Image (cartoon, rainbow, N blue to C red):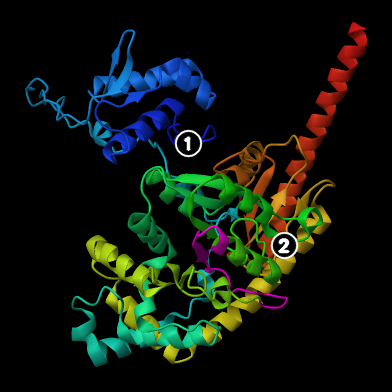
Amino acid sequence: MLPFHLQPESHIPLYVQLRDQLRALVHSGELRTGDRIPASRELASQLGVHRTTVANAYAELESEGLIQGHVGRGTFICGTPARQFTPPPRTNGNGNGGMRWESLFADERAEEGLSRLMPDVPADDIAFITARPSDDFFPIEEFRNCCSAVLRSEGRRILQLGSTDGYEPLKRVLIEMLRGEGIQVRPEQLLITGGCQQAIDLLCKAFLRPGDSVALENPAYPGAIAIFSGARVRALAVGVDTDARRTGHVGIDLDALESVLLQNRVKFIFTTPDFHNPTGTTLPIAERRRLLEIAAHYQAPVIEDYIYARLRLRGTAVPSLKSLDRSGNVIHIDSFSKIAFPGLRVGWCVAHESVIERLRMVKQATDLHTDQLSQAAFAEFVRRGHLTRHLAKMKKVYRSRLEALEAALEKQMPEETTWSKPEGGMSIWVTVPPGLDAGELLIHVRERGVHFVPGRYFYFQNPQPNTLRLGFADLDEKRIARGVQTLAEQLKIELRKRQRGARNESGARVALI
């Protein structure tokens, strides 16, 4: 059976997903010239889709010359012939002969999931949208001094091309910082990246081919979903427990993970064990050890996204997966984006030296190296103790804002509304009463100047429409209280509408009887 993985919840039409996956199988060599593929009715039955979906995909591939159907024999791969180019008619210069750029796009995605998390919001509105630092507290003067210092001392060097591995003084600073967190790392095990987003992209380019499988938390960080989707990688959903009453812990569902690994050849497990985005959950230490045991048993390396871990606002710190790893099976990615300045795009990856060497080669072909001035300034910023002081200050700010959000939710929200209890990070995951749609709720509260992110944007399978994420780090306590009050008022209105509808429907049934 061919390794198709269609996602009905995606905004990409099913026939387009199928067409692109078939095309990828041909280009990767998994399907070769002369191979027979299932008839449209047969494949539709296997995939659980309408026959028209398969027929439309086949029709487009046949028009490209990639497949050919023969009556009574079946449909076969024709290879990847070079199609003869037929230019359009010449124009008279009136502009009607412009390039049809959409026809050249590599896929049919009309929009990117990340763009939904960065919309334009009026300045006076209350936006619970982002999970990013508050720029009200950026230590601009201290950072300016660091930039001036490194430009004076080594401006010629850092304004030249540099090492793909990263700026050596920054690597030394990071190695010392990681050592204090229980992670022993040598220089050849560390790569400086353009943030965690680039680290995920480099790992995808270095290790994953179309059709490969990755076990991914669901819901998950939309940036990771976008990268895997763009590379036509199969993302296999593993649920996240937000209530310990079901499994005894919060975080990634390890029983579900083991089931996925048992049934599939998975190349990577991608997880955010600390203050998971979007749910805010933290995986306990016993479950972290079990996760590492499961990964080792099934020979599936773990990518640990550690980006929020330093934002512990209460409770006891839990060792990272990397610090618990004794076999070198964990790839640890991190960034300054949540603890300092996200706009500078400086992060890092810690892994076995063979992994880092491969990533270095891919990065060199991608962007040569991360911006050297940013690296040098960050190294100086850390050396002078500014990062430690800034982080301590921001943790107090965020703790106060988290407590304000929790207090407002407790005071204002109607019954049946629940939310996660994060010990850090930048967001809370809210579940409104069943039957309500957070997307429809957003339409109403947006008119009243309040914005949030519906939970469905974080799911790549089986989205839960009655979920939403509230980011608190970029809002002061008064705006948090006003925003939650508006949200709760609208939620109560929607509940009353539903109750009236239920009564009307019940009355209509009685009248009919």
Residue 471 image point, x, y percent: 61, 59
Q: Which picture quadrant has residue 21?
A: top left
Of mark 1 and mark 2, the one earlier in the sequence is 1
Label 2, residues with CA under 10 Å away: few <14, some 14-19, many ≥20: many
Q: Tell me which segment is drawn in magenta.
A: 296-317
Which residue is label 2 attached to? 405
Question: Could you tell me which secondary element the residue under label 2 belongs to?
Answer: helix
Query: Residue 114 bears which disc, if any?
Result: none
Check disc 2 and give the amino acid type. Leu
Residue at (45%, 72%) from the top-left corner?
341
| Residue 444 visible in the snapshot | yes
Left or right? Give the position of 92 relative to 465: left
Residue 280 image point, x, y percent: 65, 61
Question: Could you tell me which secondary element the residue under label 1 belongs to?
Answer: loop
Left or right? Give the position of 454 relative to 495: left
Which residue is label 1 attached to? 5
Figure check: 199 above or below 21: below
Q: Which picture quadrant has residue 124?
A: bottom right
Figure check: 176 above or below 270: below
Left or right? Give the position of 261 relative to 39: right
